[in-house]
């Protein structure tokens, strides 16, 4: 039976939706695809007013979560996302933070428990395409790793998605961007990325041109103002932002339809 083309992006925190997938969410919505953003945590371990960090005096987890979810709603509006689904788990914080040990932290929820909730959403929306992080959560964040685990488990549990993608940060292009930033005085001359940062270009299967939606992405990122201190991309000049935001990159992990090995459309093989 034919069903509406649907993209589901599974992310860990409010603001994660923008950098790696904000363009495809805006692009596919504009094309009439139903877009579903699943945000797993409420972002309690983000910065509080004045940049106060978790564990410091004045950091109020509940107030931070309320602010970040409000910012998320604004970001969703800028990107035109069709549906926002909140799993409502507690933010675990960065790897090694005290919040990792909280009994209710997302990273400590049994995978099968959270995956069952995500599977219910997959049953409801019937997405052909799922996008989430790779097995390392792109950079080792416990909640990103957990989001990966439950997305893969729910996809296997339901058998619904035809294509599963991991977001990717192309190593070569990131180096080019930082070289530009150093030459422009925006990064220290001696700053070097770790050798293992990002994804080798040869592993990337899918590159989507989202350049018409760069402004949407910038506005969506600006909506997450409470975390602005941590978002260096907002401090870059417009030409550098355009370079950073104009394409999004993915590793196709599963494909049950006839699609080219290298593609510029996540719905390749799924359109009439």
Image (cartoon, rainbow, N blue to C red):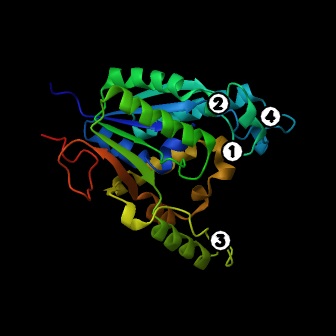
Neighbours of disc 2 within 10 Å: few (<14), some (14-19), many (20+): some
* First reached walking from the N terminus: tag 1 or tag 2: 1
What secondary structure is marked by label 2?
helix
Q: How many marks?
A: 4
What's the distance in space between the residues labelled 3 and 2, CA to CA?
36 Å
What's the distance in space between the residues labelled 1 and 2, CA to CA?
13 Å
What secondary structure is marked by label 3?
loop
Image quarter of the N terminus: top left
Query: Measured from the top left, where is residue 219 in percent x and y?
Result: 50, 46
Residue at horizontal 58%, vertical 26%?
Answer: 110
Q: Nearer the viewer, mark 4 or mark 2?
A: 2
**Side of 18 relative to 58 (left or right):** left
Q: Which residue is mark 2?
A: 108
**Residue 213 visible to the viewer:** yes
Residue at horizontal 17%, vertical 47%?
Answer: 258
- State yes or no: discs 4 and 3 in contact (Cβ < 8 Å): no
Relative to 21, residue 12 above or below: above
Indicate which disc residue 59 carries: 4
What secondary structure is marked by label 4?
loop
Residue 103, picture quadrant: top right
What's the distance in space between the residues labelled 4 and 2, CA to CA?
22 Å
Neighbours of disc 3 within 10 Å: few (<14), some (14-19), many (20+): some
Q: Which residue is mark 1?
A: 94
* First reached walking from the N terminus: tag 1 or tag 4: 4
Q: Which residue is mark 3?
A: 187
**Residue 11 visible to the viewer:** no
């Amino acid at each position: 039976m034919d069903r509406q083309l649907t993209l589901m992006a599974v992310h860990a925190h409010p603001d994660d939706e923008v950098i790696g997938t904000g363009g495809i969410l805006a692009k596919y919505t504009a094309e009439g695809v139903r877009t579903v953003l699943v945000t797993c945590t409420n972002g309690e371990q983000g910065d509080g007013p004045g940049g106060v960090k978790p564990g410091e005096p004045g950091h109020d987890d509940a107030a931070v979560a309320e602010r970040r979810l409000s910012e998320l709603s604004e970001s969703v509006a800028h990107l035109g996302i069709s549906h926002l689904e909140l799993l409502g788990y507690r933010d675990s914080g960065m790897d090694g933070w005290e919040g990792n040990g909280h009994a209710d932290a997302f990273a400590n929820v049994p995978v099968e428990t959270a995956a069952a909730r995500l599977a219910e959403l997959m049953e409801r929306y019937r997405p052909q395409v799922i996008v989430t992080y790779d097995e390392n959560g792109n950079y080792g964040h416990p909640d990103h790793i957990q989001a990966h685990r439950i997305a893969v488990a729910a996809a296997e549990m339901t058998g619904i998605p035809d294509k599963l993608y991991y977001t990717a940060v192309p190593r070569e292009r990131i180096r080019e961007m930082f070289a530009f930033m150093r030459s422009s005085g925006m990064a220290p001359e001696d700053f070097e990325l770790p050798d293992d940062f990002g994804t080798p270009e040869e592993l990337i299967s899918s590159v989507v041109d989202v350049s018409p939606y760069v402004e949407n992405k910038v506005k969506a990122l600006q909506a997450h103002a409470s975390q602005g201190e941590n978002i260096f991309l907002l401090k870059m000049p417009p030409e550098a932002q355009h370079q950073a935001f104009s394409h999004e990159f993915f590793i196709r992990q599963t494909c049950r339809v006839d699609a080219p090995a290298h593609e510029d459309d996540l719905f390749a093989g799924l359109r009439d």
